[in-house]
Image (cartoon, helix red, strand yellow):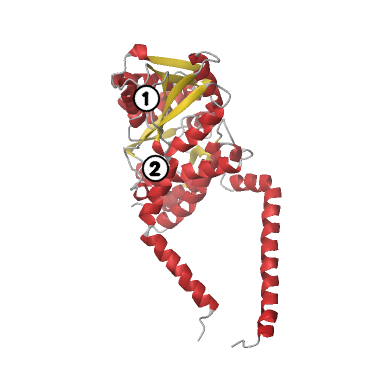
């Protein structure tokens, strides 16, 4: 019991000083982070990008979701002879298809690849409709099981490469398949300026949320499940 | 006997947490309502649907036209992406023209404005040019409810130096509503995105 007011005052002084020191430290850290924001933001983006594609691979596996960049990047890798075959996936239809405005995403990817010089015979579709990166990895596992495959290169948007590599290694690892990734660069932003674009902010934030979510949700899931 | 400060703080924190849990539905519904901007509609020169929800927004734009609030719907030509430039997909305004016509909008009531539009400033310039420079005008912007505040803020800035007034017509999304958005993945993602951009634009 602190009965003496003088004792209470002397007890408050060090705690008050501690609070001021803590507030000052936080301010300094925030100020330093603000001053160094550009290298920090660039570093945060680079931490998600993995570019380790290497020949010879058996397949280029193009993930869905961005026809503006992924099939174009796959066509460039095909031209560089990284792999002799390109794999696509099947996706659920959307309302634009219902009014006949567009091709399906798979057909769109296929046509882009063709126009970029990839022969139709070099493009295959993995059977089964997919809705997520995990689905794509599972369908690919089914497709590749029993085939003499040693390496695949997964082609996806730069910010998605780390999660994609983790997902595909998680799923294909026990088949002895070496999974590599190659980032498809966007036209509007990259690792050096993503925070200046609304879309860039959203895709990087999403990725930083999805990466731990995938590790927690699928980290212990059976690969064949 | 006096209560220890940390005990008191713990009780207050627990009470606040319990209150937040008990009142989470109205709080979250309020967050959604905050992002919805809808104004009373008046007779206008053009209905301007934003290319958001391709089911609800064109249907609402067609209904506004049918109800006689405006004589025409203005679609805008966006800057084409790589796939569109290859001729593999239709331009967005052509897709939306088909959707509107399928909803009963006469072709003559659809106006296509601008070229290579990339942002709201370009859109404002195209709409202003279509209405006639320096001519007072009124447009009804049809937007998806969760995105309507962002659209309203941005378009009001873009039209600030013009004589064009804006009415906002916010359209609910079919997949979720103000009272259920946190129970669906698309609702969570949508409001995460909307609030992120709202904060971002606030600090920019």
State the image coordinates of residue A49 (x, y, percent, origin top left): 57, 44
The answer to which quarter of the image holds residue A107 is top left
Instruction: Report whether A217 appears left or right of B153.
Output: left
The residue shown at (68%, 79%) is: A9
Res. B30 mark: none
Specify the quadrant that holds the C terminus of chain B: top right
Closest to the observer, A46 or B135: B135
Q: Are marks 1 and 2 on the same chain?
A: yes
Q: Element under label 2?
A: helix
The alpha-carbon separation of the residues under discs 1 and 2 comes to 20 Å
Can residue B133 be seen by looking at this rendering?
yes
Q: Chain of mark 1?
A: A
Read off the residue under disc 2: A136
* Position above or below: A209 against B18: above
* Position above or below: A34 against B14: above
Instruction: Report whether A84 appears left or right of A4.
Output: left
The answer to which quarter of the image holds residue A141 is top left
Read off the residue under disc 1: A103
State the image coordinates of residue A182 (x, y, percent, origin top left): 54, 39
Question: Which circle's residue, 1 or 2, is located before the other in the chain?
Answer: 1
The residue shown at (56%, 34%) is: A185
């Amino acid at each position: 019991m602190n009965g003496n007011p003088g004792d209470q005052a002397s007890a408050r002084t060090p705690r008050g000083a501690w609070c001021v020191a803590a507030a000052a430290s936080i301010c300094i850290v925030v100020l330093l982070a603000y001053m160094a924001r550009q290298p920090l933001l660039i570093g945060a983006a680079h931490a998600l990008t993995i570019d380790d594609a290497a020949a010879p691979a058996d397949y280029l596996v193009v993930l869905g979701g961005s026809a503006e960049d992924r099939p174009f990047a796959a066509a460039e890798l095909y031209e560089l002879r990284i792999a002799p075959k390109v794999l696509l996936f099947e996706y659920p239809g959307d309302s634009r298809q219902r009014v006949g405005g567009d091709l399906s995403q798979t057909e769109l990817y296929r046509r882009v690849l063709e126009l970029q010089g990839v022969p139709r015979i070099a493009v295959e579709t993995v059977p089964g409709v997919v809705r997520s990166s995990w689905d794509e990895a599972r369908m690919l596992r089914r497709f590749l099981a029993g085939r003499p495959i040693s390496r695949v290169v997964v082609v996806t948007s730069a910010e998605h490469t780390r999660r994609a590599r983790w997902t595909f290694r998680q799923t294909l690892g026990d088949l002895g398949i070496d999974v590599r990734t190659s980032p498809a660069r966007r036209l509007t932003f990259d690792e050096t300026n993503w925070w200046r674009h609304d879309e860039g902010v959203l895709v990087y934030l999403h990725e930083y949320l999805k990466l731990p979510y995938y590790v927690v949700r699928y980290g212990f899931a059976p690969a064949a499940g | 006997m006096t209560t220890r400060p940390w005990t008191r703080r713990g009780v207050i924190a627990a009470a606040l947490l319990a209150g937040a849990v008990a009142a989470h539905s109205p709080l979250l519904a309020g967050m959604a309502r905050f992002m919805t901007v809808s104004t009373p509609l008046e007779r206008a020169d053009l209905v301007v649907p934003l290319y958001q929800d391709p089911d609800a927004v064109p249907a609402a734009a067609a209904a506004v036209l049918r109800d006689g609030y405006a004589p025409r719907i203005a679609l805008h030509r966006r800057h084409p992406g790589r796939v569109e430039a290859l001729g593999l997909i239709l331009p967005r305004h052509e897709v939306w023209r088909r959707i509107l016509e399928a909803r009963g909008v006469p072709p003559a009531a659809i106006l296509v404005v601008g070229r290579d539009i990339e942002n709201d400033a370009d859109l404002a310039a195209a709409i202003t040019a279509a209405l006639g420079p320096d001519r007072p005008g009124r447009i009804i912007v049809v937007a998806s409810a969760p995105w309507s505040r962002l659209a309203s803020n941005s378009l009001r800035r873009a039209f600030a130096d013009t004589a064009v007034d804006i009415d906002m017509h916010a359209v609910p999304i079919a997949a979720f509503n103000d009272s259920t958005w946190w129970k669906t993945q698309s609702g969570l993602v949508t409001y995460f995105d909307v609030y992120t951009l709202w904060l971002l634009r606030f600090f920019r």
